[in-house]
Image (cartoon, rainbow, N blue to C red):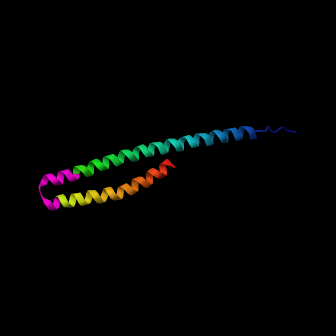
Amino acid sequence: MTNIPDVSADLEAAAKRVEELSEQVTAQAKANGLLWLEGYEKVLQNMLDLEVEAAKKTGVDWANTLATAHANFVRETSEVFFQTLSNQLKS
């Protein structure tokens, strides 16, 4: 009769290592995603500030009003988007 080695302990150890590695990868991906999101938010805010400043320097009231309204709309909508994603990445 052939002896079949008991590999269940080895399989459990390998599964545990895979699970630990998976948790590490997930945690790092969340941290990287959060950093990227924060960086993107800063870039967007700077671009919107530039848009408003450029419109002000034209001296044209309607251009200034339009650029300010657009920047405010994007800021308000992106704030909800960024906050939601940030909360998901932190959990």
Q: Is residue 75 above or below residue 2?
A: below
Question: What is the quadrant of the N terminus in the image?
Answer: top right
The residue shown at (53%, 42%) is 25
- Image location (x, y in percent) of residue 7: 75, 39
Q: Is residue 73 above or below residue 25?
A: below
In terms of image quadrants, where is residue 11?
Answer: top right
Residue 38 drawn at (x, y percent)? 38, 46
The residue segment tinted magenta is 51-63
Which of the two residues, 19 or 30, is positioned nearer the viewer here?
A: 30
User: Along the horizontal axis of the image, is 85 left or right of 40?
Assistant: right
Question: At which x and y percent is residue 32?
Answer: 45, 42
Residue 55 belongs to magenta span:
yes
Q: Quadrant of residue 35?
A: top left
Nearer the observer, 8 or 74 = 74
Q: Please determine whether, in this image, residue 79 is positioned above or below residue 36.
A: below
Query: Left of 88 or right of it: where is 49?
Result: left
| Residue 26: in magenta span | no
Residue at the (40%, 45%) spot, across then down: 36
In the displayed structure image, the side of residue 44 where residue 61 appears, left or right:
left
Q: Residue furthest right?
A: 1
Residue drawn at x 39%, y 57% is 80
Magenta: main secondary structure equals: helix
